[in-house]
Image (cartoon, rainbow, N blue to C red):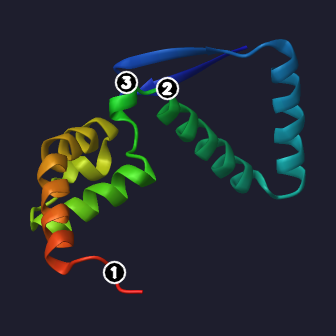
Amino acid sequence: MLLQLVFEDQWFIPVPVDDRLQEALDVQRERAYRGDMDEAFTDRLSACISNSLAECLDPDLQLPTANQMKYATDIARELGVAIPADVLRYRGAAHEFIDRFEEMFRANRQRRDIAIGPPRA
């Protein structure tokens, strides 16, 4: 069996399905249909395919990591700069934002820490 992903009727990607997977999908589909869970299975399959596609993207096009998001937010808050939308959408843009402001952020934090002085015991 050949499964095919179609993007806007312009990009067709063949997805080979071996006999074992085809058989398992047939059983799963029948289970879902008999149990009146067809829509739930379709939704689950759709989510799995979407997640798999996201993992296939080049690293710079994937979602930013949690650490990148926190660091970019800390930088923006500390320096009073806006976070461009792409920084929240793409790992590469987040990296560029952090790279652009990191030195200024660290220097600003260091000046603030010096002004406050050492913590009291």
- Judged from the image, the secondary structure of the residue bearing numbered disc 2 is helix
The extreme bottom residue here reads 121
Is label 3 in contact with label 1 (beta carbons under 8 Å)?
no
Q: CA distance from mark 2 to mark 3?
A: 21 Å
**Count of numbered tags:** 3
Give the residue displayed 51% in from the left and 32% down from the top.
55
- Judged from the image, the secondary structure of the residue bearing numbered disc 1 is loop
Residue 100: x %, y % from top left: 13, 42
Q: Which mark is residue 119?
A: 1
Q: Is residue 57 above or below residue 20?
A: below
Q: Residues within 10 Å of mark 1 (few under 14, many from 20)?
A: few
Q: Which quarter of the rendering shows the C terminus? A: bottom left
Give the residue displayed 12% in from the left and 66% down from the top.
111
Q: Is residue 118 above or below residue 66?
A: below
Amino acid type, label 2: Cys
Amino acid type, label 3: Asp
Q: CA distance from mark 3 to mark 1?
A: 63 Å
Residue 23: x %, y % from top left: 88, 24
Amino acid type, label 1: Pro
- According to the picture, the residue beneath numbered tag 2 turns out to be 56
First in sequence: mark 2 vs mark 3: 3
Q: Residues within 10 Å of mark 2 (few under 14, many from 20)?
A: few
- According to the picture, the residue beneath numbered tag 3 turns out to be 9
